[in-house]
Amino acid sequence: MRLGADLISIENNNVQAAAGTNGKSNRRLVGWKAIGQSLGCTERTARRWEKRSLPVHRVPGGSRSSVWADPEELTIWLRTLPHDVQASLRAELGDVPEAAALAAVPLLAAVPLPAAVPQTAAALPAPADEPRHVRRLWPIAALLLVALGVTALTMTISQRHPAAAATVADAPYDDNSQAREMYTTARFELSMRSADSLAAAQKNFQQLVDRYPKRAAGWAGLANTYLLLREFGSMPDAVAYPQAARAARTAVTLDPQLADAWLDQAFVAFWWQGDTAAAFQAFKTALRLDPNSARAFHWYATALEAHGDFNESLQAMARARALDPGNRAIAADEAWIRFGLGQRAEGLATLERLAQLDPNFVSWRAYLAHAYLILSRDPDFLREALAAAELRGQPEVVAGLHSAAQQFQTGGRQAMLDQLSAAEAAAWERGTGSAVVVAEYRALAYDRAGMLKWLAIAEARHDHNLAALRGFAEFSTYRDDPALREVLARLP
């Protein structure tokens, strides 16, 4: 067993260091073993995560396995991942004792150990003149020191963050390596929030619940996937919401203490069923079960904003961003909430800056389209709406937007809004559109009678977007209109 020797030679053989001209360290992690040790996972796991955007570089002219990585790039990459994905990466250590010991190496430097325990095994090199039988004991001693370090680390984490320690111990599918791999892969795909990644996540979660139907985590993940497919993919609300409701209900039945399952139920209750009382009760249950869930605060914030509770919404969103500062969806929703609250210049500038940094993320392109339409910047609206529809994989929406663009060229804004209204009304007739959305277009066209007509239809047919009517910025011109105020007063 070469563990002791490997630990001692990490700095000598696997890390190249050179001082840059600016005084910054130019350390490189050379080889998959060093990269895995830096991440706190096995070499095999590091190789697998290369396919998921792990920033590694290949040595020119070298073999396929000749790779190196910059520690700072790895740190930045880790920080940009959602917290649950970071946990998933750490959870992929496998069942090999050597892997578990190696995983402790990069963590020992970050957590102070008791004075009696050296910081690393490398602090105890074997003297060259030691008898051979004594030198053979050094690898064993190194392993024991690492084990002591792991124990001290675990105790420190448990004392400082008992909830976090319990979460790690109770991670889903820890008793089944195959199921764990499928689950962590699906969670990562879910976090990417693209049409393709969500389709892959749906497939993986479906296989997971088919194989392990009594495990709640898979059902909750499937529910979450359906909810995101309607926002970031092309799945219609009428298809996605019922599927999500079924999966979330199954998850809660299997594990009433699973916060994610309650969160999915809350989302369905608010945005599809229009049951605000049940929705907010489920949100509070999810937050009670997991008070450090960024997703729970995020979704709670968007529901509060749609319900007209603007100050509470911003407070909840700030908490979500503090818990997961690298989450793109949270940043996009916060900017849109600020735009809707009247901070239009600030909200729009944030969305435009984010879209420049990452033009392939749907949320800010979709929000920019809404903002530009409200501001009568119609060419910008058409550009961003087309971009969002293409990213979602919605060919029918793309075709409708091309028709709207033609109407704009020939008849201006009014003709474009008439075309958008007609297309949404036709979708409503087919069961895939929303009467509230038609009312939005009529409001923007200053067609008060048309707006009130479609809002009346929405009330009569229990349109699922009614619950969010208070938060729609498109109706801002009519906020003081007595007829609209009566509609708002009838909302739960």
Image: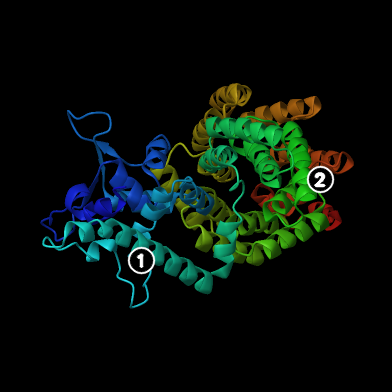
Helix, strand or loop at label 1? It is loop
Q: Which mark is residue 110?
A: 1
Q: Residues within 10 Å of mark 1 (few under 14, many from 20)?
A: few
Instruction: Pinpoint residue 246: horizontal percent, then vertical percent.
Output: 78, 39
Give the residue at x 43% y 67%.
153
* Label whose residue precedes the other's in the sequence (2 or 1): 1
Amino acid bearing label 2: Gln
In the visual, does 473 lie left or right of 84?
Answer: right
Quarter of the picture containing the C terminus is: bottom right
Helix, strand or loop at label 2? It is loop
Whether residue 118 is situated above or below residue 490 in the rendered picture: below
> Which residue corresponds to mark 2?
273
Front residue of this view, candidates 278 and 449: 278
Does the residue at mark 2 contact the one at mark 1 (Cβ under 8 Å)?
no
Instruction: Pinpoint residue 304: horizontal percent, then vertical percent.
Output: 69, 59
Amino acid bearing label 1: Ala
